[in-house]
Image (tube, rainbow, N blue to C red):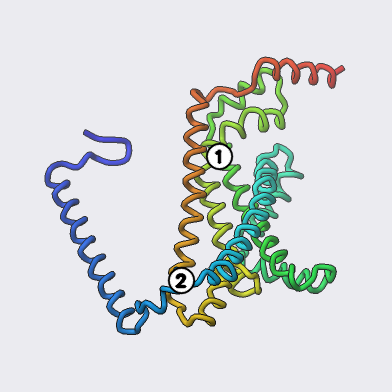
Amino acid sequence: MTSVLYDTPGPKAKARNWIYTAGFLVLFALAAWWILSVMADKHQLDADKWSPFVTDDRIWTTYLLPGLVETLKAGAIAMVIALPLGALLGMGRLSDHSWVRVPVGVVVEFFRAIPVLMLMMFGYAFFVQFVPAVSSDFRPVYAVVTGLVLYNSSVIAEIVRAGVQSLPRGQTDAAKAIGMRKGQTMVYVLIPQAVTAMLPALVSQLVVILKDTALGGSLLGLTDLLAANRQVSANYSNTIATLVVVALIYIAVNFALTSFASWLEGRLRKSKKSTGTVVGAADVNDMATGNNSAGA
């Protein structure tokens, strides 16, 4: 029995897969044992390194939770701006007019090719030189959000373009047959259908946005969750333990985001039983009336 992607393994192949899995688990266990042994030799597993996270609530109220709030704030602002901006750039890249498509393509490819950290640094320098009204306390947030928006909106634009182009050509042809303009076809027919296909890639990019805020905490002075690591380590002398806890917090937040996205994707797929147009009859009549009025 075969599928589209691979042949179903037979008895021997299944046995080999079990052997490979067992071998990997053994190697993983040995590597974990070696790492823990080294940490124990360096006194990194001593109780005094880890107990403050349970016994001293100041670690959370003074350092970690405020840093998490700053991380979520910078990430949320960047997401709110980058998502609609990326959608607009993506639609611009699909425009039939070269005077729209070409400049938008240049902008997208330019910012997509520059490392996000460099964009943050350029943003910081820009606010220092040309926007003195932004105080030094808020400048790191502005710089981080600027870099995240410029880079990720360009990536989201490519996700939108690929998602729309993945739809069957008949969707566009059917919209044209009932008199819809290109903009109406994009907004009412193509984008709503492409959202479900784009959602996994979009969520992955949102996770990237949230993680990349750590660049600002590391190099630009943003008081985010990663920056809180240095403060905790300086006060409690437990760098490894703090990094582990910070990493677990990042994992928990990103897992919550991806879990919500998976739930949302399931709801969207259930609500769309077919890939037909999602424009209702009343919407078609309204658009047809608008087209006739414009023609008159």
Q: Is residue 115 visible?
A: no
Q: Is residue 201 above or below residue 268?
A: below
Q: Is residue 121 above or below residue 22?
A: below
Q: Local crowd at mark 1 within 10 Å, few (<14), some, or many (≥20)?
A: many
Q: Are marks 2 and 1 in contact (CB under 8 Å)?
A: no
Of badges 2 and 1, the one in the foreground is 2
Image quarter hosting the C terminus: top right
Q: Residue at x 84, y 71 (%)?
A: 132
Q: Local crowd at mark 2 within 10 Å, few (<14), some, or many (≥20)?
A: few
Question: As drawn, is 39 to the left or to the right of 190?
Answer: left
Which is nearer the eye, 10 or 234? 234
Q: Residue furthest bottom?
A: 42
Image quarter hosting the N terminus: top left
Q: Residue at x 70, y 37 (%)?
A: 96
Amino acid found under the numbered disc labelled 1 = Gly
Give percent across and percent down for residue 98. Answer: 73, 43
Q: Residue at x 71, y 28 (%)?
A: 184
Give percent across and percent down for residue 82. Answer: 66, 51
Disc with the residue nearer the chain's start (2 vs 1): 2
Q: Is residue 278 above or below residue 158?
A: above
Secondary structure under the numbered disc 1 in the rendered image = helix
Secondary structure under the numbered disc 2 in the rendered image = helix
Q: In this figure, which residue is indicated by the disc labeled 2? A: 55
Give percent across and percent down for residue 27. Answer: 23, 66
Q: Is residue 152 visible?
A: yes
Between the residue at mark 2 and the residue at mark 1, the CA separation in whole angstroms equals 50 Å
User: Which label sits on residue 163?
Assistant: 1
